[in-house]
Structure formats: structure tokens, C-alpha cells
Amino acid sequence: MPSLLQISWLIPFAPFAGALVVGLLLVSFDRTMNRLSRPVSYLLIICTAISTVLSFILFKTNIIGQVFDWTFDLANSNLHIGLYVDSISTLIASICGFIFLALMIGSYYLMERKKGYVRYFVFLAFSCSLVFSFLYSGDIFHKLLRL
């Protein structure tokens, strides 16, 4: 059985994969996907919940480490793409994940299911994935901002 640190790549990947699949289906089958607003909502809420719960478990067990690290040479500068897990990032990711879950569940119960509803949930899941990626990224965003 893999350890929690080995499967922590699921934290930014689960909402991204859900948003990518639903987004591609939305582009391909617009009418059908807009009719399937409830299952789409369930799928994206579950993807976000998986990431949030995994991040909270990592915070409670106080697991710290590096999941992966790739180095690229771009414009005479080394760019490290990696996933680093530490206590501060897991705490902030858990809080942000709970905020995204509250926003998604509140939107599910309070919003009318019109044409832009599925697109709204796809953008919420994609932005949740970006927040998780930023929190666990290490220094990739900081190096890109300096270029």
C-alpha cells in the first residue's frame, strides 16, 4: 500500500482531472452536459473533497517531504517543477479546500441550473486545482514571476 506522501500528487490532480474531463465533454456535447448538471456537480464536488480530505490528513499526520522534482533549463535559468509537502502548505490547502467545498455545495443548493451552471462548476474545480498547485509548487511560480 502506498504511503500518503506517494499519493499526495492527487491533491492538485483530482480537481484538474475532473474539470478537464467535464470541460472536454461540455465542449463536445453542450446540450447533454447542461442537462446533466447534477451528476457533474457531484463529480466535481467529490474531486475537490478528495483533495481537501487528503490535504487535511497530511496536515494531521504531519508528513513532510518532496513528492517529485523535475528540473528544466529555460533561458539560462533552472526551473524546478515539483510538489513539496510541508505543514504550512497542507494547513492553507485544507482551509482553501474547505472554502471551495463550501462554495461548491452552496452553489449546488442555491443556484438555478441554467446554461452557465456546468461551466461555472468547471471553472471552480479548475481554480481549486490551480490554488492547490500553487500551494504545493515550491518555487516554480516565484521563478516565473522573476523572469
Image (spheres, rainbow, N blue to C red):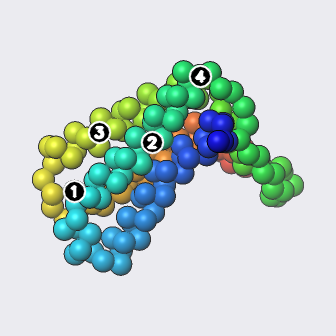
Name the front one of labels 1 and 3. 1
Structural crowding at the residue carrying mark 3, measured as other residues with C-alpha within 10 Å and reported as few (<14), some (14–19) or many (≥20)? some
Q: Is residue 111 above or below residue 96?
A: below
| Residue 23 occupies quadrant | bottom left
Element class at badge 2 = helix
Element class at badge 4 = helix
Q: Is residue 127 above or below residue 100?
A: below
Q: Tell me the tag on residue 38.
A: 1
- The amino acid type of the residue labelled 2 equals Ile
Q: Earlier in the sequence, mark 3 or mark 2?
A: 2
Q: CA distance from mark 1 to mark 4?
A: 34 Å
Label pair 2/4, CB-CB below 8 angstroms? no
Q: Tell me the tag on residue 103.
A: 3
Q: Earlier in the sequence, mark 1 or mark 3?
A: 1
Residue 147: x, y in percent? 73, 49
- Total tally of numbered discs in the picture: 4
